[in-house]
Amino acid sequence: MAINYTWNVSTVDVKEIDGNADTVFNVHWRLTGTDDANDESSTVYGTVGLDTEDLSDFIAFADLTVNDVQGWVEAAMGEDRVTEI
């Protein structure tokens, strides 16, 4: 049985931090696991705050990708929590 996982990280909260407009500081996420063999799915959702102390790798909001935001969410949650979910 293979389960496919899909992240949705399209809802974010932004504010200006250190002169950087639209800095993402909070992400509302959903993770859906789908078992195609049994036509079943389940979704878990939550919110995670991001560390905005060091913005040396700042990415302008217009240039963000889903992969960028998903990576931040997974890093903020930690590998053990992501695996647990």
Image (cartoon, grey):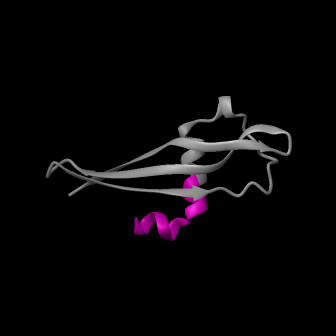
Q: Residue at 25% across / 55% down in the picture?
A: 2
Question: Is most of the magenta stretch helix, strand or loop?
Answer: helix
Residue furthest to the left in view is 38
* Quadrant (top left, top right, bottom left, bottom right) of the C terminus: bottom left
The residue most toward the top is: 62
- Which residues are the magenta region? 73-85
Q: In which quarter of the image is residue 59?
A: top right
- Quarter holding the N terminus? bottom left
Residue 77 forms part of the magenta stretch? yes
Taking the spot 14% from the left edge, 52% from the top edge, the residue there is 38
Residue at figure coordinates x 51%, y 50% from the top left: 28
- Along the line of sight, the residue nearer the viewer: 83 or 20: 20
21 to 75, vertically: above or below: above
Q: Where's residue 22, x and y in %? A: 71, 37
Left or right placement of residue 5 versus residue 69 in this view: left
Q: For this rendering, which residue is in front, 12 or 68?
A: 12
**Residue 54: x, y in percent?**
80, 54
Judge from the rendering whether residue 40 lies leftward or rightward of residue 45; answer left or right: left
Tell me what residue is drawn at x 85 percent, y 40 percent. 19
**Residue 62 percent location from the top left of the image:** 66, 29
Q: In which quarter of the image is residue 74?
A: bottom right
Q: Which of 65 and 15 is in front in this view?
A: 15
Q: In this view, does 40 lie to the left or right of 43?
A: left
Q: How many marks?
A: 0
Is 44 in the magenta? no
